[in-house]
Image (spheres, rainbow, N blue to C red):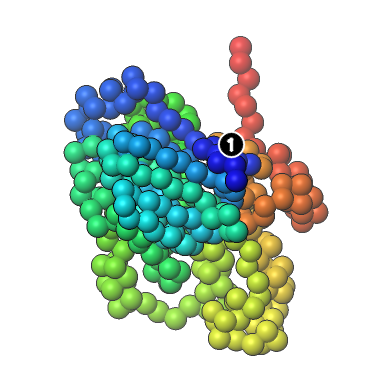
Amino acid sequence: MPKLKEGFVGSRRIVLPEAIQEMIKGDSFASSLYITDIGYYPTAKYHYRFREHGAKQYVLLYCRKGDGWVRIKDKRYTIHENQLIVLPPDVEHEYGASEASPWTLYWIHFHGSLSKHFAEGLDSPFSIPFSEDSRIFDRLVVFEDIYRALTKSFDMKEIQYANSALYYFLGTIKHLSDYRSGHSEGRTDSSIIERCRHYLMENIERKITQEELCEYTGYSKSSLSLQFHREIGISPMRYIQRVRLETAINLLEKGGMKINQVCYKVGISDPYYFSRLFRKVTGRTASSYLPKKSDEF
């Protein structure tokens, strides 16, 4: 079986140069918690890494969908959808995607004086199952903000912003149970459309069926369709399509991602189908939403 470190369709990665990392270590704020590498590998078939002496930093692996596996010294774990693990520095490890259902992986290498605090207790699979308080989509929006900041430049201002966002990203994981217990006390009932939208946004990177929405809401297929037509005048499947394309437009307008990267982020694995669907529904090409490059004089 082939073994690939990178090069997956739609993937993205940034590795901060050693000189920039040394600059960060000299900054009193940034040095407390900082990123050295960050990336996103969608449907990473044949993905595999082995480090005999580990990495110099903590390595967070966040499986968004699919499956994979991780070995830390003599302990081996299976990693499923919406699970993550943090590998300790300087410890032999290896990991890879499942052959049958390769993972979509978000990953971050991080270090700093507070890194141990955020990594503590996450050296075995940690589940972030979908719920009304899981904030999966919000967390991944923060990931994109971090990534976008580091694509702009390695200026200390952008690095400090990215590292500040990392506090929130890791904090929502480490203190997830505390947030859920506190937030559930003040929850109010939402409309069926709002509940479905929340479910769609939390699971937007994978295929979603009307049957799933029925199971989540407790409605039959006919009843759910009736509710959608009454409230917004379209079917649940058309609504799923609308939410995907609205999210894609937002990602395109923010910049920093190519069209074949955006389509994976909204649960469409075929860039050609995505482009055709986009033009059919919106009347415009996906590329027309990309930020215009400023003229150079």
Residue at horizontal 23 percent and vertical 37 percent from the top: 112
- Which residue bears the numbered disc 1? 7
Please, what secondary structure does the residue beneath circle 1 have?
loop
Locate residue 57, reporting x and y percent.
30, 37
Q: How many marks?
A: 1
Locate residue 282, reporting x and y percent.
75, 53
The amino acid on which the numbered mark 1 sits, given as a three-letter code, is Gly
Q: Is residue 279 left or right of residue 69?
A: right
Residue at horizontal 41 percent and vertical 45 percent from the top: 94
Work out which quarter of the rendered image holds the C terminus and state it. Answer: top right
Location of residue 146 (image quadrant): top left
Locate residue 167, reporting x and y percent.
29, 47
Location of residue 23 (image quadrant): top left
Residue at horizontal 72 percent and vertical 74 percent from the top: 235
Q: Is residue 256 above or below residue 68?
A: above
Locate residue 219, reporting x and y percent.
60, 86
Residue at horizontal 45 percent and vertical 69 percent from the top: 130
